[in-house]
Amino acid sequence: MIALATAAVITSSAQQICPLPFEVAQTESAARAIAEIVIKQDPSRSNNHAVDHLTIYWVEERRSWIINQSIQRDGVRFGGGLSMEIAACDGRVSDLDHPR
């Protein structure tokens, strides 16, 4: 377990080719940085909800990261944060979801 994140790998034999000179979100730290920017832009987010815990999964088949945010209040962590997919190739955010 990495501080503030849990990472897992989901693998498959399929490979996608990135048309860019390099993948802009090829590392967990790059995906985390993108996710934190998106989370901080959430208009429903109050300032006391820090980006405190992100669970990050790598999906080899899609060459993308799945990110789930947990919210912590009064020392208790629970769901309710944003979730999203971030493409390794171009850093594109998709499947952005905010449970209501």
Image (cartoon, rainbow, N blue to C red):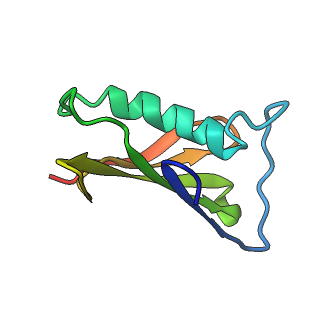
Residue at x 82%, y 34% (from the top left corner): 22
Q: Is residue 17 left or right of residue 52?
A: right
> Does residue 9 sit above or below 4 in this rendering?
below
> Does residue 93 sit above or below 15 in this rendering?
above
* Res 10 quadrant in image: bottom right
Q: From the top left corner, tell me how far across and down residue 76 is, in percent.
A: 22, 56
Count of numbered circles on the image = 0
> Looking at this view, is 58 or 8 the one in front?
8
Q: From the top left corner, tell me how far across and down residue 40 is, in percent.
A: 34, 28
The N terminus lies in which quarter of the figure? Answer: bottom right
Q: Is residue 58 left or right of residue 94?
A: right
Q: Residue furthest bottom?
A: 12
* Res 92 quadrant in image: top right
Q: Residue furthest right?
A: 21
Residue at x 19%, y 47% (from the top left corner): 73
> Does residue 93 sit above or below 4 in this rendering?
above
> Looking at this view, is 91 or 79 the one in front?
79
Q: From the top left corner, tell me how far across and down residue 39 is, in percent.
A: 36, 34
Residue at x 77%, y 55% (from the top left corner): 16
> Looking at this view, is 7 or 44 the one in front?
7
Q: Is residue 27 left or right of residue 50?
A: right
Q: Is residue 50 left or right of residue 24?
A: left
Residue at x 37%, y 38% (from the top left corner): 51
> Does residue 26 sit above or below 64 in this rendering?
above
* Res 25 quadrant in image: top right
Q: From the top left corner, tell me how far across and down residue 57 is, in percent.
A: 56, 60
